[in-house]
Amino acid sequence: MDPAGIVGEVKAARLLGRGGAAYPAGSKWEQLLAIEGFPKYIVCNADEGEPGTFKDRFIMERVPFRLIEGMTIAARVFGASEGYVYVRGEYRSVQKGLLKAIASARAAGLLGRGIMGGALDFDVSIVSGAGAYVCGENSALLNSTQGLAGRPRIKPPHLAEVGLFGAPTLVNNVESFANVPAIVSMGGKAFLDLGHPEGGGTKLVCLSGHVARPGVYEVPLGSLTLRDAVFSPELGGGIRGGGRLKFLHLGGQSGPVARPDQLDTVYSYSDLRKAGLSVGSGAVVVLDESVRLTAYLSAVARFFVRESCGKCGPCRDGAPAVLKLMTELDDPGAARRGTLDQLKALSDLMNEAAFCGLGRTATVAFRSAWKAFPEEFERNALGVSASRGRFAWVMRAIAGRPARDAIGASIRCSWLVHPLHRGRPSVAPKGLPSDRGRLSVPPSVCAPFRARADMRGTRRFRKENGGSGSPGGCRRSCGARPWRGNRDDPAEKAMFRRK
């Protein structure tokens, strides 16, 4: 079979990416095949950092030759001579086993020069990650493979054009590559018939949490419901200890939350998407009624605070604010007026403004849980406009919106904070309480998400806008000093820490 024929079979199979994004593998292969640049690289994303996901580990431990064969087929299609498997840093034992499998393949003439006596030269190397969740994003993974900081790239150009070492690159998940040999062997149409008409084949599902039979299960897409996956004796076996189901968390920490009344949704990419859910990485975390939803979401928010790469403001500074607000909602006596409104607004802004998928999906669990269980959040939230809360300046700043209400000029937000002139309602920003000096007014004209300005920039801004220019004076020469955060609040102090 020639390269175009193999790509045609992968397209006919409607193999959707198994790493979480569900991008059609056939389209990705077709795009790379049309690019004439050489060399081309084959990269396998085995950085399985999504909590509740362990299917790739199962493949690499139990059937590593399926992965190697899939990558070799891809090398045959694209004329690549080098392949890399980027394995999660915590999977040390998996890396050792995979190295042994690669050595066995070389000894059998299935890797190296002149594979099976033919003209194909292809070899595979292992690259170990360092435990960064963000390196599951393909461009961050390639940067890490090159020895650079594991941070996402701007796209375009796409990785098929400028990937590893600036060359055209194919990046697929472990499970995606492991399906390729079956597609080539049985044909794309037969593989499609195994699953759903809009997404063929089978899917490895990772059941964990309060389920009687946790583990990895291979299920045909579109052949069962969420109820079957959790309660079928052959699969999940029901709730552990005879408890009652409260909710499911699908697709990992960046995935949505499912209610018990959604259990009859068919497990396929299209059906779950129509229900506001997703397959994601294949994780299905089962939680019973002993779990407090707000406590669980606080743990999710803490995970994203720890795993943010810090490249963009919405994720770097928004995630700690989300954690702070979510922690307050979880504490019956700590929730303040407008906490829920602030959290919803901040979540929307992160979804719109974050640089990569990590920041945009960091609050997916909260947004879906809010729709599914509003009473759990409203229990401690009294509901005041988000523009009046302590983190309103965060929302304005990460959105990069004009600050006309604050200073009467159409400029972008920065990070130093101007006082609201306590006790002087006539000069407080419109719609904001005059007794809270905690909203941001930019000290200098800058692009969104720019680093904090220094004091020289602050003085220059004041002079240009009619102020005294003195370090302690504001633009109205009232003598008030800029507010730089509550030094007693660790979360707010961290936001203002100079890099």
Image: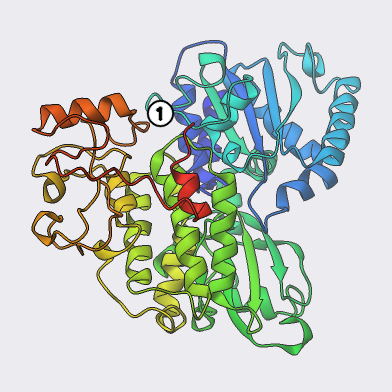
Q: Quadrant of residue 78?
A: top right
Q: Position of residue 246 (x, y in %)?
A: 59, 82
- Residue plotted at (15% across, 63% down): 431
141 in relation to 262, above or below = above
Q: Quadrant of residue 428?
A: bottom left
Q: Is residue 227 left or right of residue 327?
A: right
- Residue plotted at (12% across, 58% down): 430
16 in relation to 159, above or below = below
Q: Position of residue 482 (x, y in %)?
A: 29, 43
Is residue 225 something one can see in this rendering?
Answer: no
Is residue 168 something one can see in this rendering?
Answer: yes
Q: Position of residue 207 (x, y in %)?
A: 70, 66
In-front residue for pair 474/186: 474
- Residue plotted at (17% across, 45% down): 403
Judging by the rendered image, the residue that carries numbered circle 1 is 154
Q: Is residue 201 left or right of residue 236?
A: left
291 in relation to 325, above or below = below
Amino acid bearing label 1: Ile
Colour approach in the figure:
rainbow
What kind of element bears circle 1? loop
Q: Is residue 334 left or right of residue 385?
A: right
Q: Position of residue 28 (x, y in %)?
A: 48, 34
In-front residue for pair 474/58: 474
